[in-house]
Amino acid sequence: MRDYSEARLVEETCLTILRELGWQTLDATHEVLGQEGTLGRESQREVVLTRDLRSALVRLNPGVPRAGIEQAVEVLTQDRSALSAVAANQDLHRLMLDGVPVLIPDEESGGEKTERVRVFDWDQPQNNAFLAVQQLTVKSDLYTRRPDVIGFVNGLPLVFIELKSSHRRLKNAYRDNLRDYRHTIGHLFHPNAVQVLSNGTDAVVGSMTAGWEHFAEWVRVESEDEPRRVGLGTLLRGVCAPARLLDLVENFTVFLETQGGVAKILAKNHQVLGVNNALRALGEAGQNRGRLGVFWHTQGSGKSLSMVFFSRKVLRKVPGNWSFLVVTDRDELDQPAYAGQSGTRCWSYPASRNGVIRHPPSQRTSCPHYERLTVSGVNFLLFFLRLSPEVRSGRRDAGRDPRSRPPAWDLPDSRARPGSGTDW
């Protein structure tokens, strides 16, 4: 009884915070099925709230006829069980970003034309519907499960939240619950964007392919100058506030092809804050002789992915014909950026709008060759990726040792401070 009451207390705290952030909330413990029912689901197998999805698509696409809207609903809700979980998720993520292609009548030609149906309004979060549902029963062919909280945006289950009592180890939420849900009701995670685990005191977030070791805390919300705060409240405000959640889905999610298959990568707290700082600096680049500043990373904290996140957000949010050039001062820095690209001093890569990193960069052996990459009308952003003096001298742990940096720098967070790191 104690476990149940404490878990419900954490759950209610979670829902209270979500309401403060602008979410609607609903308890589906006694859900009534049917089009006129609680959520409009016809069966407990359904994981997309089709009624809400259709309403959002109509609202966001006033020029698309009803037949086009129905095509988009069918594409977004189709059975993807023949695909791997990550392939299904990647397919839906692409449709979320680029819109759903549908055929509609072309009055000029008398035939048909392709139109893209918007799934979300990325720029105006208030134009989307955010609904957090607690205790929703989800069925598969063999199993029935009831997750603690599912966050729906325009009817799509983007947020999964598993909560434990405050005295329970957080890892149990991953080991005993999340892994089970991924296996038994895997179709729930086909549209998923973020997965949150918390016992109230501690909280971590990860992607739908993340192992426990890749779940991470979220300790600051708006600024790197904030004091470090661990807990469910900070994480929800940093990840699930409507504008921040949409930013994560649109600009801070990539699919990385690895030797073990495709991995979905969700940016860490320091990457989101650092990249958004760099975006603001880009808008002020003319006042700083074209320089954006220095984005400090410790070893292993994802500097290469930070450049990818930054590049993708520039492509989606900043008008212009952009290309990106990366310069390194050591062979070993090429390996983290792209496996197998060692021996390169200067290379460029095409950033992908839909978040898939597939192709190796264009290699250049020396920086003077970069002039050959420039094309009239192309905006170039250059990253200079360099080792700190400690690592150059052979101290492989230098980036992880707080004593190797001024105490004002709260490692392992990235700070846009002059003197070391990645010059942008």
Image (cartoon, rainbow, N blue to C red):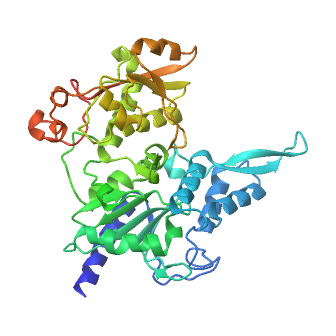
- Residue 26 visible? The answer is no
What is the x, y in percent for residue 71? 73, 58
Figure quadrant of the C terminus: top left
Location of residue 264 with respect to 156 vertically, above or below: above
- Left or right, residue 149 beside residue 404: right
Left or right, 422 with reference to 313: left
Q: Residue at x 48, y 60 (%)?
A: 192
At x 88% / y 45%, what residue is drawn?
Answer: 111
User: Residue 355: x and y, percent?
Assistant: 51, 43
Q: Quadrant of the N terminus?
A: bottom left
**Residue at the outermost right position:** 110
Across and down, in percent, residue 403 comes to: 8, 38
Q: Is residue 71 above or below residue 32?
A: above
Q: Nearer the viewer, residue 230 or 297?
A: 297
* Rendered position, 311 above or below 194: above
User: How many discs appear?
Assistant: 0
Indicate the position of residue 333 as horizontal and vertical percent values.
Answer: 32, 31
263 horizontally vs 71: left or right: left
